[in-house]
Image: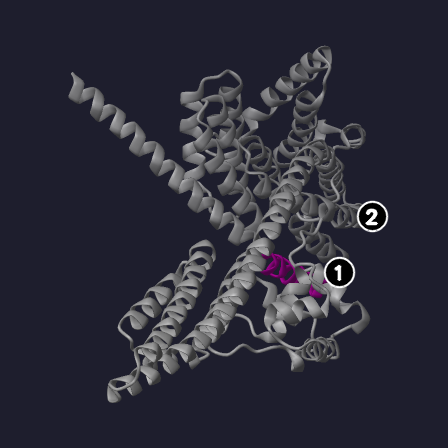
Amino acid sequence: MNKTLFLLIYLLCSSSLFAKSELDSLIVLLENTIKEAPIYEQKKINKIESIKNILANTHISKEQKFFVNGQLIEEYLKYNFDSTLHYVNLNQKLAEELGNPELQVQSNIRMASVLASSGRYFEAVEQLERIDKKHLSNRYLIDYYNALIKVYNDLNFYTPSVQNKQRYSTILNEYINLLLPLLDKESDQYLSILEKQYRDQRNLTECEKINTLRLSRAEMGTSEYSLITFERSLLFELKNEPLLRKKYLILSAISDIKAEVKDNASLTELALILNEEGDVERAHHFIMFSFKDASFYNSRLRFTVISEILPVITNAYQIKTAQQQKTLSKLLVIISVLLFILLLAIFFIHRQLRSLKKAQGELKKVNDQLKLLNYNLKNSNSQLNVVNDKLAEANQLKEHYIGNFLTIFSNYIDKLDEMNKMVNKKIAARQFEELFRLTQSKKLIYTEIQEFYKSFDDTFLHIFPNFVEQLNNLLTPEEQIVLKDEERLNTELRIFALIRLGINDSSKIAKLLRYSVNTIYNYRVKIKNKALTDRDNFENSVMLIGVAKK
């Protein structure tokens, strides 16, 4: 019994982890698809232009123009409302000029459908009321009922009035009952209506079966796939399966981008969910992308929906950004303090090394005197006492410096503790010449400076990973800074990195980087002379590197 329970728990956990991993991968895929959105848009533009080129033919007849306009309407339908409306208007005029009743009906129904899709419901109804449905063929009667169903379905969904909702629902069902006998029972439209009825009745098992069948017939990157996956997310919302709901919203959003469907709802819904889950940055990124699509499409209905969500997500994003900036400011203060401590430690260590060098000289003199004493055993005890006193004094001085050296080392830089131990060992072994040779070398200071540069470079680039690229964007192309292999920042970049951190005084920068003030000034002037735009505002532009754009 216990083994069975354990196995069940293990399978549930494994399934949950797999679903979470799949969602993470899909989110990354969605973000990459958003980056590639201009590619898909260019394909859409190229296709539209190729159709428009047909209209440029002066020998094309009005009937042919009508059908070419119809192709443009299909391309613009979910891409740009104003362009769709423009070509529908053109077709209405062409149909009247041709005196063709069938084309007039077709263009009028299309106009009603377009108006309904943008939230202009009563204008759509007025358009449809002008049509005498008694003489419509099945083909146009289907389109006629579809337009009315779109109107009353949206009115039923968006109205806040319970009384109106019931009235719109009754009218909607009447038109659905009139439409269903005209449809092929295997068609996607028939199955879509049936699926919605099952969903409204909460018969989720049958609803999922139909949706699965429809999804198997659709192809990613089409408006049909986008719609079916969006409806599938609604199904899993009712089944209280949030991971699957998010999965199909993501797939729907990816398909919308690939199909260049600007009139979309999936990404907006996904942004709202992510905001509720605390993933504010992604939510803000997605809602801004949806807002841009809605602006381009110019849908009154879509604007209304997004306008209710956008302030909520934007406010959450601004709060989180403010918190991050506050944290960043604290980190910068801590880093500045640590840098100051490090520089102070290096300064005192340098002084101690000079003191050790002086002590070594004293010890050398003592050794010389000891050698003389060894060769001349006839010297008096008083002279030997003087030498011993000097030796004791030198040893006392040596111990004083070593003690100070150890104290500073242990408080500021652990690495230098090893050197202190080595110095102590050499002195104890009286290897004074070798110790003198080691302390003469500037390798320690050079190494510590390079380690300081490396720590600064790594820390700064962790905070501003794109600093080099963004600074180069401020320079003329031929004057941009090119780093050597394995070089993260050079002197010029470090100067402007410090400026970005708010250290603007050349004397302070010179102390931190161990250059003269004049050298720092020359570097600053040299870089500003390479500026792409106004050199006087160059450093202000540097201060904006890494700042989030609203």
Circle 1: residue type: Ser
Q: Position of residue 381 (x, y in %)?
A: 30, 77
**Residue sitting at 64 percent across and 43 percent down?**
326
The secondary structure that dominates the magenta segment is helix
Residue on which the image places disc 2: 93
> Foreground residue, 163 or 149?
163
> Foreground residue, 318 or 258?
318
Along the horizontal axis of the image, is 398 left or right of 41? left
Q: Which residues are magenta?
A: 37-55
Q: Is residue 486 visible?
A: no
> Foreground residue, 419 or 60?
419
Q: Is residue 439 shown above or below 54?
A: below
> Foreground residue, 222 or 174?
222
Q: Is residue 329 visible?
A: yes
Residue that lies at the very extreme toward the top in this rendered image: 163
Q: Is residue 226 shown above or below 439?
A: above
**Residue sitting at 51 percent across and 15 percent down?**
201
Q: Position of residue 167 (x, y in %)?
A: 70, 13
Residue on which the image places disc 1: 61
Q: Quadrant of residue 479?
A: bottom right
Q: Position of residue 241 (x, y in %)?
A: 44, 26
Residue that lies at the very extreme toward the bottom in this rendered image: 375
Along the horizontal axis of the image, is 347 left or right of 240? right
